[in-house]
Amino acid sequence: MFKTLIYAMDGSESEAALPTVRELADRFMSRIVIVHVREMVAGRAHLPYRADERRIEERLHEIVEQLRAEGVDASLEMHSVVGGRAARIISEVAERQNADLIVVATRGHSPVLGVLTGSVTQRLLHSAPCPVLAVPARAASAAKAEPIAA
């Protein structure tokens, strides 16, 4: 059912959906494509929006290596954009990879705050070429406490 999963990650908060992605991959023998979009600040140097970008990228590589060591077909795609087009990039990757599902973690913002801040998840819900599974941070925290059933 889910041959290819896109796991959109932008940092440690989005890692909360990892148990869900892993369970889906185990259950359906899916491959996982982790997608990270570096948002850059416009200017002469085009600097990363987040100061901890290097640490985030190192962690993403660790996750891919861990998944591969556990027998999961996993890969990482990193893209850089200026001007907040992360949802569009994720949608384009999902289309190119012929993805069956995009998985993202929510940050727990209220719906109003999400609209005001331009949530990537909300944009994905409107632009994705396949279904989007938004894993609430609080649900993902509860799932961490329980072992993943294969």
Image (cartoon, rainbow, N blue to C red):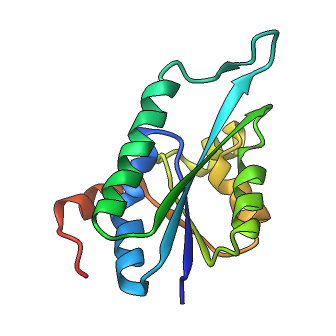
Residue 139 visible in the shown view = no
The answer to whether 25 is drawn above or below residue 59 in the figure is below
Please identify the residue farthest to the bottom as the structure is shown.
1
Question: Which residue appears at 23% of the width and 72% of the height?
Answer: 148
Q: Quadrant of residue 116?
A: top right
- In terms of depth relative to the viewer, which is nearer, 125 or 60? 60
Q: Residue at x 50, y 52 (%)?
A: 106
* Number of marks in the rendered image: 0
In front of the other: 41 or 76: 76
Residue 120 seen in the current view: yes
Q: Is residue 23 left or right of residue 87?
A: left
Q: Is residue 119 left or right of residue 24?
A: right
> Taking 35 as reference, is 38 above or below it?
above
Q: Position of residue 21 (x, y in %)?
A: 42, 67
Residue located at (79% from left, 63% from top): 127
Which corner quadrant holds the C terminus?
bottom left
Q: Position of residue 29 (x, y in %)?
A: 42, 83
Q: Position of residue 39 (x, y in %)?
A: 68, 32
Q: Quadrant of the N terminus?
A: bottom right
Taking the view exactly as shown, the residue that stands out farthest to the top is 44
- Taking the spot 48% from the left edge, 46% from the top edge, the residue there is 107
* Residue 149 percent location from the top left of the image: 22, 79
